[in-house]
C-alpha cells in the first residue's frame, strides 16, 4: 500500500517527459493579461450588437416592428429571423445533419414564430456603442400572444399540457436523433416528449425474484448553469468580397464555422473562424449563440460587429444542464451481489429537443457488473433555455440517484460502501447493462486506491459529521483531429493543432511531441489553429481533446522524426535504415563518429531537401471510459442547515496523465462544480417562467472560502488504445460529488437528501421532518 | 457469423430476438444482411440514400466505439451493438 501524499500519481509506466509538469506555454500571456478572449477583438469601424430578448417564457410572435430602432441615431443594422434563410427543422430532412437539429438551433439563436423561453433572442441591433444599441433595441415593438408556459417535465407530460411545438415529431428509436418536426400534412402528435430511449439486458423480473434486499428511490435535480467566467462573445466581419471572419471563444472553431455557414446558407469555405482564448465552457460553448447574429449584423451594416452577452443573458438564454427526475430500483443477494436494476429517467430538454438523458441512462450503471437491468428514458420539452452539454452531460444526475441508492443498499446489507462497490465492480470483459463488453479500465484499481487512502482510514470524529463515498462513470469520446509540426532552423517546433485549449491542452500537445522527438518541451510552440490553417478537428468536448489531438501531435512528430532520419542518411550518404534516432541525436548504427543533433539537422534542412513539416489527420477509436471514486467528509450545522465540506479526496483513473497538474486541475474543478450543484446551485423561476436569480449574487456558486483543499489521486491504468495510454479526464470528476455529499449528510445526521440542491433550507426541512417538527 | 445485439426498440422487427447472427465483414454488410432477414431495420439505423449511419447512432464492435461507421470491419466472431451516440461537455 503506498503512503499517500497530497496529489499523488500512482504511475505504472514512466516516460521521459510525459508525466512531467512544465509551465504551460500560454501561462505568461494569461498572468500578464495579454491573452485575448472572446470580447477582446477590436477592429477599425467596429459596431456593437445588442439582442432584444423575449420577456415571456411562451408566446406567439405576431409581429415585429423594427422601424423605430432603425431610425435611432447611431444604428447601422437591425435583424430578425426574417434576415436569414429558414433552416429546415423537419425530421425527414435530418439525414445530412449532425447530432444537432440545425433548424432548431437556428431558431434558438433567433426566435422564429414563437418565443419559447424568457430571454429567447427576438431581434438584434448594431450601433456605434453598446449603449446606443441597447436604447435602439428597446424601441423594437413586438406584438406577442402570451401563452401558458410549461416549466417542469412533470407539467409537460400532463395530457392537457400546453404544447411547445405543435408539429413536434415524438420519436422512439435506437438512435440519439436530435428530434424534429413532422412533415407537412402529417397529423399533430400534440406532445412535449421529444424522444424516448430504452436499454435492457437479462431477465430483470427474475433478478428481483432472486434478490434478498431491494432498494427503491426517487431523486430530483434542478437545472444548473455551467457558470463559466467568460460570457459568450464574438466578433464578425463580413468583408466586401463575401468572405466572413469570426473571432469568438468557443469549444470548437469548426463548429462555429459550420453552424454559422449553414444558418446563413453560405459555403464553409467562405467562413474563417478564429479561436480566441476561452474563459471556461464546460460543454456549453460547443454550439453557437452570438456568432451568427454578429455575422448577420455585419452583412447588413457592412462593418465588423461585436456581440457580447451580459451575465443575465448567459443565465437566461444559454444552456443550463437539465433538471431531472429519476427512479431506481436495485436488488441484491444477501452476500452483496447486485442481481437486478431498473431505472426510469426524465430530463428537461429546454425549449428544443436534446437533453442528455441518453448518456445519463447509459452511464448510470456503467461501472457495475449487473446481469439484469432495464432502463427507460424520456426527453421532455419545457419553456426554459435549450439545455446544453455540461461536463459528463446527463451522468451526474443519474449517478446521484444510483450512488445514493447503493449507499442505502450497502447499509441494509451491513457492508462497507467501497467494499460493496468492489464486489460489484465491472472489469475488462464484463458486459455493461447497455450491452457491449467493458474494455480495459481501472475500476477496481481506483476503488482499491480509495479504500487504501489515508482519508478513508482516518476516523472522522465530532458531532453531526459524516463521511460519504460515491463513484462515477463516463464513456469519453474521440473524434477527428489534425496537427502540423513545423521544424524551425534553430531546432524548435511550431506546432499547430485544432483543439481549443480549455484546460492546459497546449502543454499536453507539446509534451506528446517532445516525448517522440526527445527535445525539450520548451522548444515546442503550440498554437490552436483557425479553420483555414488546420484540418478539421471536432469540439474540445467529451474529454476528447488530449486523446485525439494528442494522437495527431504524436503522429505529426513521428513524421518529423522519420524525415530527420532521412536527412541524416542523405548527409552521410547511407540508407536511412542505418540511422538511429535516440534522444534527439541521430547516429550511424555502426559508426559512432557519424553523429548529428536534432538542432544540427534542423539548421541544415533547407540545403538537404527543404522545410521539414510533419502533419497528421486522425480519427482514432478506443477513447476508453473513465472512473472516479470520491470521499467526502461534511459537517452539518443543525441550527442553520448549512453543510460544510471538511475534507474531500478524488481518486480517478486517468490512463496516463500527460501533464499531472492539469489532470489534477480538471479533477479539482469538476469536484468544485459538483459541490456547487450539490449544495447551492439551481435555477429559480416564478410562475410566469421568469428566472429570479440570474446573477452570480443570487445564483450561488462555491468560492475558495467555501472549500477545503481538494486532494487528488491519479490512478494510471493505461488505455491500450492510445500510444501513451491516455483516457479523457475532464468530465468524470463532476459525476460523484452530489451523491458522495448526500451520503455524507446521511452519515452525519441520519437524513437521506434525495433532491438537489441540498441547500440549508432543504436540510433544515428534512431534519424537522425527521424529528417530527 | 457476427452477432448483432438488437436495440430494444427494434426487437419488434426481429420477432423479439435480442441477438441475431447475420453475415457480413463490414458494418454495412451486416446491416444489409439484417435488412434482408428483418425488413425495416435498416431505416432505423442508417440513411439509405447516403448509406451512412445516422449521426446519432454509435456502432460498437467488440466493445469499441467505431469511428468508421458503415466501413468498420467486422470479424467472424464479432459482437455488434447499435447505441445512441454520446456527446460530451
Image (cartoon, coloured by chain):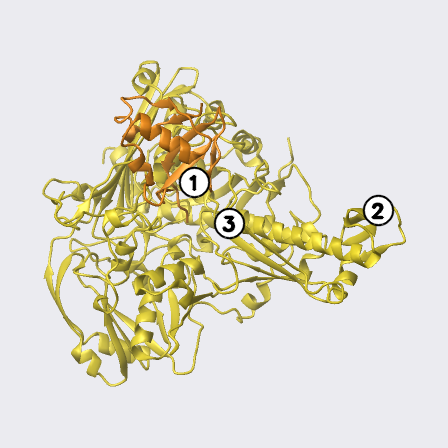
Q: Which chain is orange?
A: B
Image spot of residue A10 (x, y percent): 62, 38
From the viewer's perspective, tell me whether residue A50 is left or right of residue A550: left
Q: Are marks 1 and 3 on the same chain?
A: no
Q: Which chain is yellow?
A: A
Q: Are marks 3 and 2 on the same chain?
A: yes
Res. A589 mark: 2
Q: Earlier in the sequence, mark 3 or mark 2?
A: 2
As drawn, A509 above or below B1 = below
Circle 1 sits on which residue?
B69
Image spot of residue A439 (x, y percent): 51, 31
For the residues marked 1 and 2, what is the alpha-carbon distance in whole angstroms?
A: 44 Å
Image spot of residue A771 (x, y percent): 27, 33
For the residues marked 3 and 2, what is the alpha-carbon distance in whole angstroms?
A: 44 Å
Q: What crowding class fits label 1: few (fewer than 14 Cα within 10 Å), some (14-19), or many (20 or more)?
A: many
Q: Quadrant of residue A61?
A: bottom left
Between A416 and A726, which is closer to the camera in this rendering? A726
Q: Nearer the viewer, mark 1 or mark 3?
A: 1
From the viewer's perspective, tell me whether residue B44 is left or right of residue A513: left
Amino acid at each position: 500500500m503506498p503512503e499517500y501524499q497530497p496529489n499523488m500519481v500512482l504511475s505504472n509506466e514512466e516516460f521521459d517527459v510525459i508525466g512531467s509538469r512544465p509551465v504551460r506555454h500560454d501561462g505568461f500571456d494569461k498572468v500578464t493579461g495579454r491573452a485575448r478572449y472572446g470580447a477582446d477583438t477590436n477592429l477599425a469601424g467596429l459596431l456593437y450588437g445588442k439582442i432584444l430578448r423575449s420577456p415571456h417564457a411562451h408566446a406567439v410572435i405576431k409581429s415585429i416592428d423594427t422601424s423605430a430602432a432603425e431610425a435611432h441615431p447611431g444604428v447601422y443594422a437591425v435583424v430578425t429571423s426574417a434576415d436569414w434563410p429558414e433552416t429546415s427543422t423537419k425530421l425527414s430532412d435530418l439525414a445530412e445533419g449532425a447530432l444537432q437539429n440545425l433548424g432548431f438551433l437556428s431558431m434558438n439563436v433567433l426566435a422564429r414564430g414563437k418565443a419559447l423561453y424568457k430571454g429567447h433572442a427576438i431581434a438584434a441591433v448594431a450601433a456605434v456603442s453598446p449603449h446606443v444599441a441597447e436604447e435602439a433595441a428597446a424601441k423594437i415593438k413586438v406584438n406577442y400572444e402570451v401563452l401558458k408556459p410549461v416549466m417542469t417535465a412533470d407539467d409537460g407530460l400532463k395530457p392537457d399540457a400546453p404544447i411547445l411545438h405543435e408539429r413536434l415529431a415524438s420519436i422512439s428509436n435506437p438512435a440519439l436523433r436530435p428530434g424534429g418536426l413532422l412533415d407537412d400534412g402529417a397529423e399533430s402528435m400534440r406532445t412535449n416528449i421529444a424522444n424516448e430511449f430504452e436499454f435492457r439486458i437479462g431477465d430483470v423480473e427474475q433478478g428481483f425474484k432472486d434478490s434478498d434486499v431491494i432498494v427503491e428511490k426517487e431523486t430530483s435535480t434542478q437545472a444548473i448553469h455551467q457558470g463559466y467566467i467568460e460570457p459568450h462573445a464574438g466578433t464578425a466581419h463580413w468583408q466586401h468580397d463575401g468572405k466572413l471572419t469570426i473571432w469568438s471563444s468557443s469549444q470548437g472553431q469548426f463548429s462555429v464555422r459550420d453552424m454559422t455557414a449553414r444558418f446563413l446558407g453560405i459555403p464553409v469555405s467562405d467562413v474563417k473562424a478564429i479561436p480566441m482564448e476561452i474563459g471556461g465552457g464546460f460543454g456549453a460553448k460547443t454550439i453557437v449563440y452570438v456568432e451568427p447574429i454578429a455575422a448577420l449584423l455585419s452583412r447588413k451594416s457592412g462593418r465588423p460587429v461585436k456581440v457580447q452577452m451580459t451575465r443575465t443573458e448567459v443565465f437566461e438564454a444559454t444552456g443550463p444542464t437539465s433538471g431531472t427526475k429519476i427512479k431506481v430500483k436495485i436488488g441484491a443477494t444477501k452476500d452483496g451481489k447486485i442481481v437486478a436494476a431498473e431505472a426510469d429517467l426524465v430530463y428537461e430538454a429546454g425549449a428544443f429537443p436534446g437533453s442528455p438523458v441518453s448518456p445519463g441512462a447509459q452511464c448510470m450503471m456503467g461501472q457495475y457488473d449487473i446481469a439484469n437491468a432495464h432502463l427507460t428514458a424520456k426527453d421532455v420539452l419545457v419553456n426554459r433555455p435549450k439545455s446544453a452539454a455540461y461536463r459528463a452531460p446527463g451522468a451526474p444526475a443519474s449517478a446521484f440517484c444510483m450512488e445514493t441508492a447503493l449507499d442505502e443498499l450497502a447499509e441494509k446489507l451491513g457492508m462497507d460502501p467501497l467494499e460493496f462497490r468492489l464486489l460489484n465492480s465491472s472489469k475488462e470483459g464484463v458486459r455493461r447493462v447497455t450491452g457491449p463488453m467493458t474494455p480495459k479500465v481501472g475500476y477496481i484499481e481506483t476503488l482499491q486506491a480509495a479504500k487504501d487512502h489515508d482519508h478513508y482510514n482516518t476516523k472522522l470524529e465530532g458531532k453531526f459529521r459524516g463521511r460519504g463515498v460515491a463513484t462515477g462513470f463516463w464513456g469519453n469520446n474521440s473524434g477527428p483531429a489534425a496537427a502540423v509540426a513545423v521544424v524551425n532552423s534553430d531546432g524548435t517546433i511550431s506546432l499547430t493543432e485544432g483543439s481549443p485549449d480549455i484546460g492546459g491542452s497546449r502543454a499536453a500537445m507539446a509534451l506528446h511531441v517532445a516525448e517522440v522527438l526527445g527535445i525539450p518541451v520548451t522548444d515546442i510552440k503550440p498554437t490552436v489553429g483557425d479553420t483555414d490553417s488546420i484540418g478539421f478537428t471536432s469540439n474540445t468536448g467529451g474529454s476528447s481533446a488530449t486523446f485525439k489531438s494528442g494522437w495527431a501531435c504524436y503522429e505529426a512528430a513521428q513524421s518529423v522524426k522519420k524525415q530527420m532520419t532521412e536527412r541524416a542518411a542523405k548527409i552521410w550518404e547511407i540508407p536511412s535504415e542505418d540511422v538511429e534516432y535516440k534522444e534527439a541525436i541521430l547516429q550511424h548504427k555502426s559508426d559512432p563518429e557519424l553523429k548529428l543533433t536534432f538542432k544540427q539537422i534542423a539548421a541544415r534542412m533547407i540545403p538537404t531537401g527543404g522545410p521539414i513539416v510533419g502533419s497528421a489527420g486522425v480519427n482514432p477509436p478506443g477513447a476508453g471510459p473513465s472512473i472516479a471514486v470520491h470521499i467526502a467528509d461534511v459537517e452539518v450545522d443543525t441550527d442553520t442547515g448549512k453543510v460544510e465540506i471538511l475534507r474531500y479526496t478524488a481518486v480517478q483513473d486517468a490512463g496516463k496523465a500527460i501533464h499531472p497538474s492539469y489532470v489534477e486541475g480538471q479533477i479539482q474543478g469538476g469536484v468544485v462544480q459538483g459541490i456547487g450543484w450539490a449544495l447551492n446551485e439551481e435555477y429559480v423561476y416564478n410562475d410566469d417562467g421568469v428566472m429570479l436569480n440570474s446573477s452570480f449574487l443570487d445564483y450561488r456558486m462555491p468560492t475558495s472560502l467555501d472549500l477545503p483543499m481538494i486532494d487528488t489521486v491519479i490512478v494510471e491504468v493505461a488505455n491500450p488504445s492510445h500510444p501513451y495510454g491516455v483516457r479523457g479526464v475532464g468530465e468524470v470528476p463532476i459525476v460523484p460529488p452530489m451523491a458522495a455529499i448526500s451520503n455524507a449528510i446521511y452519515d452525519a445526521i441520519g437524513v437521506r437528501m434525495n433532491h438537489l440542491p441540498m441547500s440549508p433550507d432543504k436540510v433544515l426541512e428534512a431534519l424537522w421532518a425527521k424529528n417530527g417538527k | 457469423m457476427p452477432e448483432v445485439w438488437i436495440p430494444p426498440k427494434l426487437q419488434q422487427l426481429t420477432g423479439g430476438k435480442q441477438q441475431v447472427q447475420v453475415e457480413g465483414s463490414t458494418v454495412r454488410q451486416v446491416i444489409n444482411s439484417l435488412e434482408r432477414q428483418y425488413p425495416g431495420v435498416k431505416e432505423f439505423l442508417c440513411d439509405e440514400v447516403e448509406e451512412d449511419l445516422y449521426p446519432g447512432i454509435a456502432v460498437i464492435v467488440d466493445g469499441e466505439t467505431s469511428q468508421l461507421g458503415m466501413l468498420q470491419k467486422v470479424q467472424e466472431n464479432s459482437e455488434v451493438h447499435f447505441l445512441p451516440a454520446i456527446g460530451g461537455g
